[in-house]
Image (cartoon, grey):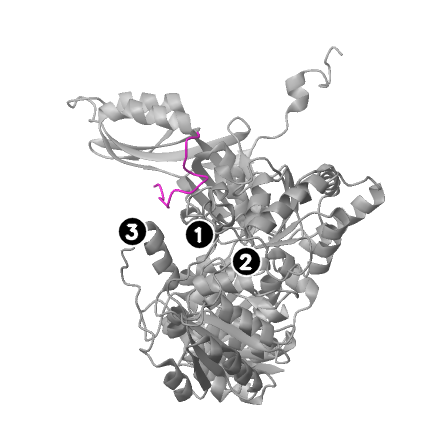
Amino acid sequence: MAMNGPASAWSSGSGRLHHQTISIIVENCAGVLARVAALFARRGFNIISLAVAPTDDEAFSRITTVVDLQETSVEQLTKQLFKLVNVVKITELPPGEALERELVLVSVRCAPPGGPGPSRGEVGDLVRIFGGTVVDVGQEALTVMLAAEPAALDEFEELLRPYGIIDIQRTGRVALAKLPHQAFRRGRGAPGGDR
Amino acid sequence: MQLTGAQALIKSLEMEHTEVMFGLPGGAILPAYDPILDSPIRHVLVRHEQGAGHMAEGYAHVTGRPGVVMVTSGPGATNLVTALCDAYMDSVPVVAITGQVSRPVIGTDSFQEADTVGITRSVTKHNELLMSAEQIPLAVRQAFHLATTGRPGPVLLDVPKDVLQEKAEWYWPNDHEVSASLPGYKPTTKGHPRMVREAARLIAASERPVIYAGGGILKARAADALRQLAELTHAPVVTTLMARGAFPDSHPQCLGMPGMHGNYAAITSMQEADLLIALGARFDDRVTGKVNAFAPKAQVVHVDIDPAELGKIRRPEVPIVGDCRLVIEEIVRVLEASGDPQADRSAWWAEIEQWRQHYPLYYAPQVESEPLRPQAVIEAIRDASPPGTTVVSGVGQHQMWTSQFWRFEEPYTWVNSGGLGTMGFAVPAAIGAKVGRPDRTVWAIDGDGCFQMTAHELVTASSERIPVKVAILNNAYLGMVRQWQEMFYEERYSEVYLSPDLPDYVKWAEAMGCVAFRAETPDDVAAVIDKANAVDDRPVVIDFRTDANEKVFPMVPAGASNSDVIVHPSQRPGGERVVQ
């Protein structure tokens, strides 16, 4: 669901494009998503995915968005976003420093036991391996759900494809910054460590 | 105390010290026009809503206070869009109130309904649809706060008719409640001390600095601070189109305007500088020319209240987010306290003097038998007008000539449409400027193409007794487009001819209640200007018949490097070299 705006000095050009996850805390008020989306379009940034929901404080919402841009333009994008009066806080979440999840619902073909073609059992195995759940069972299809890292969803989707995907809906990405784990990572400051 | 939304709206505007508003009533905004009858606020009834917007801008430009506009829903609001966009591009504080259809019918395509908040989202600093009367006082306070602080700009409040009619308890929020209601809005005004010290260090060490002063100087009321910095450092100063008047043209360090039609010395000094001190400027393409080739040898100190401007076009070595006045004062303090001597800039000034002498602003002198030289007309008006005269222009050749040949000595005496380049800006903006500063003579220097776009607002000026003066430099062409067609399209003139006497500008002006004159020969010029300056009870229009062949020089062609500036033909090799 890319939103194509005019190419701008920041979003186009020779630099390599990469996905950048940005978490935006906004006031939870009418039209705020339209403001953010309009800014992306007007300044020529490309939205790859978008997820919006209120935070624990009902007065604010968190917009998690994945954009496709050059490294140099992340700064310009966040500065432009911050000019919106309803934008309260912006966090850039570089890959590796963020916990990222998406959810997918897939309806996939499978025959009842003894029927022709792949069975429910095979699909069910895949779902179990990925840690998904079966959420609906039909005569010749299953609907399954998986919430996982985006890469795992890609893989899951590819593995299901040969069975025949009837319908699929992925959500936008949600993300939070990883908690600080310095003590454990260093292995020194932790209690019981040898120094 | 219970008030209707309409009463609360007008009372809120009064509480924000609104003296005057520009507008035109209609169905949805009708309820708000009733309490105006009992309010001390002066309402100027315009003839078209775009005029109201530009009047508000003109008012804001000269007073520093937000201009207030009120119009109705649908076409009233859409007619305002150009002016909002203009104010947004030039960071002009404007508060716009638009009527909206009643809440129950919003979204049903009802009569005169438009998605005003949607349409104006990208041309306002902020906008808001108010869904209850009790919201109004806080929304008005927020609007004035947002319009005037940080990077100024237009703010729009869209008010449904039934919200204006419903009653609510009057409550005027305090400062704390206003800032608490805007959790995402905290403009940085004080520069980062380490960055300020770094800027001061680069400035002191620079042998070839240029102060690149932009419109932000005026918005921040920083003209005095700029002068202090300039005199302390003895650095040359260029003033952009939006900053004309921020530094006196008569000052020996002033090099005039940079950019596409700038002074040769201003353009070239930036190209040769080792340090650009950009103050409230935004590296607009009309200033930089080809960005990759702009000021190639310069490091950049960039001060702006809008963080998004830092690094948008040119990455600065020293970015400073802050209010121009506060940051400049801080830089001056650091420079003075350090006691470090400024670098030797005598070689730099010697070079600059060469450019000034060889390539001054120039036009071929008026010849008796030829049509009027537009530049000579501007100089004649300039010389016949009292100090502090406010000059307003439209957009095109006449705008560039006015910026070039007027001598700006004081801040807030120059009003024009820089970023958006809105033809038709001059007449309404001049009216707003005169309302804002009735003590000053206001001259609109306009083109014939521009004048035809908004001249009808002279009816407003006549009926409201707002005595502006309008000089039409009538060359019967869309002059700037003609110039480009002459220079870059092999003189293939396409759709640029307008005719000198259709309309008959004198008759038209008289029909609108103005005094009107025509000047066709050099002998007429001084006399009609004196007559115009003598009129102080109604608007005056002069139709100056000017030479369509005159072009604006110097010129950097679009997309070219500023090092490839085209000077006046007589200043080119083989031409008649002009040395004053």
For the residues labelled 3 and 1, the Cα–Cα distance comes to 17 Å
Q: Which residue is mark 2?
A: B241
User: What range is drawn magenta here?
Assistant: A1-15
- Is B16 left or right of A63, judged from the image as shown? right
Q: Which residue is mark 1?
A: B569
Counting residues from the start of the chain, the first of labels 3 and 1 encountered is 3
Q: Kindly indicate whether the residues beneath marks 3 and 1 are on one polypeptide chain.
A: yes
Residue placed farthest to the left in the image?
Answer: A116
Tag shown at residue B490: 3
Q: Please rate how many residues cluster around mark 2, counting C-alpha atoms within 10 Å: few if below 14, some from 14 to 19, many from 20.
A: many
For the residues labelled 2 and 3, the Cα–Cα distance comes to 29 Å
Judged by its main secondary structure, the magenta piece is loop
Front position among marks 1 and 2: 1
Front position among marks 3 and 1: 1
Residue A147 within the segment the image draws in magenta: no
Residue at point 73%, 48% (across, down): B234
**Vertical comparison of B364 with B232: above or below:** below
* Amino acid type of the residue that numbered disc 3 sits on in the rendered structure: Glu
Quadrant into which the N terminus of chain B falls: bottom right
Counting residues from the start of the chain, the first of labels 1 and 2 encountered is 2
Q: Please rate how many residues cluster around mark 3, counting C-alpha atoms within 10 Å: few if below 14, some from 14 to 19, many from 20.
A: few
The chain ID associated with circle 3 is B
